[in-house]
Amino acid sequence: MRPKFGTHEYCGRTCADEAKRKANSGGGLLGAITSPFWGGGGGDDEGAGRSSSQYPGRSTGGSSYGAMPPAAGSGDNLCEHCHAKPKYAEKDPRTGAVVIYPFCGRTCRNVNAQLNVQRCQLRDCGKPSQGQYCSDKHAKKAVQKGYAQACAYCKEYPANLPYEYCSKDCGMKDARERDRNASPLSLITQDKNNYISIARRLNERWDDPILAPPEIKAIFQISVSKKYENRFKEAVSAAERLGGSTTKSAFYGGQCICDLGVPQFGTDQLCSWGSCSICIVIRKCFDVLEFNLPHHTGDLGKGIYANLNPAKANRFTVRKSNHEIRAMILCSIIQVDDYVQGDKKKHSAFIDETGRVFCANKDVILPRQLILYKTPEPRAILQ
């Protein structure tokens, strides 16, 4: 016998917990416990008084939680490993709710965990693994041996099914490459107001004593990157700060030595040849020109040359002899108002009396639409 501890009724926590257990065994929710596995008659480690290490996050504190046997004869209430003893249950003193665990005790829980350890899927390996394979070497070997489906991008590691890539990184890289290789051209159908407006503008501005206005075959919208779109917007803002400007349209003609616009070869497919001016301008927005030139050189200086008259831009279009479809680009240009004082060469396109457009600064011109048209025929033949 020991004296009481201070002002408490018991000498220590052990006697206090034992008194609570005996009080609870007299009836009520926990009074029906008679099995030694549930703390009613001693037994092994699968009774009451379990340590907090048995179920992480909970501290039973001896019999302070107690245990409750599930309904007898119910298969759903048997241990999920041994299927012989009832699942361990305890009452949460904070909420009063009864928590039922999947196993009867620590032994079954630990054995079940060992049986369910994920193992390397490579044949004849079987080592424990954090993922599908125990190492990068075995993951690659599974692909090489044909045991696993290869990643759609790297072709080196197994695909993480049901996805076609081994990782998010490969998926993102593949998406970026597809976007980079995708055509920036989208067809404008003839019933759209934009198509009608562009076709009318080409016919009204076409001024040539010999060649008649051409038959338009297709018009494509050019999707430029944010880099070039923002660059043009900043140039417009700079011109406005200078005193005022107007955005106009001009036609750019250049050699197109690929099969762009030829239906049997893919109408909207751009090439990567360094000598194809049209495809380079569409991709690079005048950052570079054919043969990697930074600019053209003419009597007005070094820069980009275009024209308000599409007939004059047509003179610079070059195509394969067996292709009757030609290509020119309709561009947006910035022109600072006449009364504005300042460095117009930097902030504005220059337009002479013949309609020729000269841009010393590539920031003030941006490709907008690609026009594919049939090679113009002389007016005398049409009469």
Image (cartoon, helix red, strand yellow):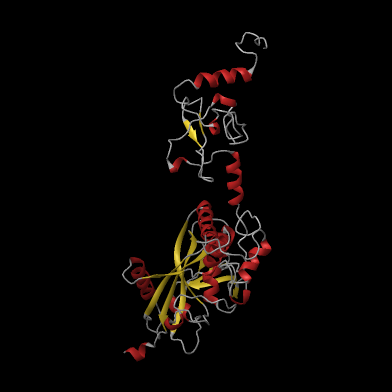
Tell me if I can see residue 247 in this picture. Answer: yes
* Left-right relation of 380 to 224: left
- The answer to which image quadrant residue 153 occupies is bottom right
Residue 336 percent location from the top left of the image: 50, 59
Relative vertical location of residue 235 with respect to residue 123 in this rendering, above or below? above
189 left or right of 64 in image: left
The residue depicted at 60 percent of the width and 11 percent of the height is 9
Residue 136 percent coordinates (x, y): 67, 61
Residue 170 placement: quadrant: bottom right
Observer able to see residue 285: no
Specify the quadrant that holds the C terminus.
bottom left
Q: Residue furthest bottom?
A: 381
Q: Eyeballing the image, is 229 above or below 5?
A: below
Front residue (pair 162, 51): 51
Q: Using the image, determine if residue 163 lies above or below residue 49.
A: below
Q: Residue at 46% across / 76% down in the picture?
A: 328
Quadrant where the image shows the N terminus = top right
